[in-house]
Amino acid sequence: MGDIDRKRAERLMQAAGLDALVLFQPEAFRYAIGAPAGVATMWGRAGAAIAIVPADSSVSLGAVASDHAAGMILKKAPSVDLRIHRIWIDLVDMNGAETVADIDPLYKRSGRAGSRPETFDRAASYNLLFDILKERNLARGRIGVDLEFVPAADFEALKHALPNIQWVDGSEVLRRLRAVKTSLEIERLRRAASAAEGGLARMMELIKPGASVSDLSAAWKVGAQDTAKARGFALSGHWDFISVGPDLSDMSAIVTAGAVIKADVGTLVDGYSSDGARTFSHGPVSSLAQDIFKALESAFAVGLEEIKPGNSFGAVHQAMLMSMRRDGLGEYYRGHFGHSVGGSVGIKEWPFFSADNPEIIEVDMVIALEAPFYGENFGALMIEDQFLVTSTGVDDMNTMPRELVDTSGDQPKSVR
């Protein structure tokens, strides 16, 4: 099954006055159902895969998906009520076929005979959605949709196809659901953070004069993959933003003496992405770089003290910004100092440590706290760790020192 907490979903939907959530975003489908939405979602349209989450947690989940994805969904989520529509991909079970003449009867026997749509049939999907809602007495309900994803044209078609339903934006309910993690989600993120950190350790060994951005990126990826393999899990993806030297956009830059190297990296485990960053150099850096990094360290420490259940995300931002002000950076304005992490689209997941954000920090949130500085004709400096919020504070998912590390000696050392 999926990662969704049905009891929490019930409470949130009741508070929002919703009878159900109908989710179209592929990542939301996987979150609710526990299986991939399938390749038909590549078109970025609403209807290729649909998850139906009734507010009443005793009522079973429903799903609409393609015949191509059905096998995997039924394998991973056998208890989900799945309705199947046809997509463009022709597929037949060839078991028992010996000649071409055997193939047509196999199509007919499996129910896969007949024409197929150009991509997928949105109207057919919406009809299947209606069937599920009707069977659950929701055909006239007030239902939330993830409108942060659904294209306007598809939403208009949905309202036309199912006119008796009151469709409203359920994006906030979905965001709040996803912000608090289950134990399985936490474990995925913990593994992802450890793999990314293993990659940083490998990359650090390669920071020598002449090493390029692409060299460092390649070393990081190999290290991350090796770490995951050694610890008995697989990566479903990875990403990195590595800069070397004063030109932040120069992807051909090479390591030189005193240049700062910023590595903002993450790996994915079952679609859940870690997010962390460290800063390195090869040889002494300028006194200005040292002073700025000290300011970032202070701001990070102050912000970390504010991360506790019951405090607001905005309070963390305020504390960190004021710390930067005390260290002389009066015009430094950072839109956010971190965010939730998880398995939704992109690396940065709501909520954010942003100005005046009243959202409350809760136990079992997994967040990334970051303190960055970007200077053109200077370079990038950054600290970022990933934390699990606990009843008493935080549990750091990272182990590497947060200092600015000089790799030029026999052993890496902190720049002071």
Image (spheres, rainbow, N blue to C red):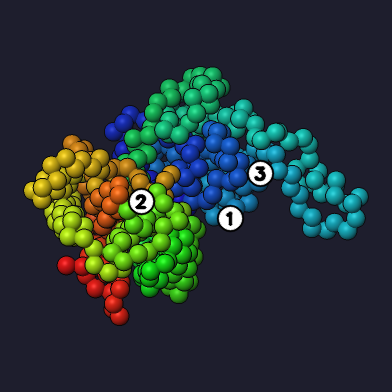
Q: Amino acid at mark 3?
A: Asp
- Mark toward the viewer: 3 or 1: 3
Q: Quadrant of the C terminus?
A: bottom left
Residue shown at 60%/45% (left/top)?
Answer: 39
In the structure shown, which secondary structural element does the residue marked by tag 3 occupy?
Answer: helix
Q: Is residue 332 visible?
A: yes
CA gap between label 3 and label 2 equals: 49 Å
Give, as a three-letter code, the residue at label 1.
Answer: Lys
Q: Is residue 315 visible?
A: no
Query: What mark, if any, has residue 247 been given in the picture?
Result: 2
Q: Nearer the viewer, residue 308 or 299?
A: 299
Q: Position of residue 219 (x, y in %)?
A: 45, 67
* Vertical position of residue 44 compared to residue 37: above or below: above
Nearer-N-terminus badge (3/2):
3
Secondary structure beneath dot 1 equals: helix
Real-space Cα separation, disc 2 to disc 1, in angstroms: 49 Å
Q: Which residue is mark 1?
A: 75
Q: Nearer the viewer, mark 3 or mark 2?
A: 2
Q: Is residue 1 left or right of residue 394?
A: right
Q: Residue at x 43, y 22 (%)?
A: 166
* SS at badge 2: loop
Sequence order check, earlier mark of 3 and 1: 3
Which residue appears at 50% of the width and 42% of the height? Answer: 26
Q: Which residue is mark 3?
A: 67
Q: In whole angstroms, how far apart are the C-alphas of marks 3 and 1?
A: 13 Å
Q: How far across and how far down the image is residue 270, in percent?
A: 47, 57
Amino acid type for the residue under numbered disc 2: Asp
Picture coordinates of residue 408, whole percent (x, y): 30, 73
Q: Residue drawn at (49%, 33%), measured in percent from left and top? A: 136
State which tag comes first along the sequence, 2 or 1: 1
Q: Is residue 149 left or right of residue 105?
A: left
Up/down of 153 relative to 215, above or below: above
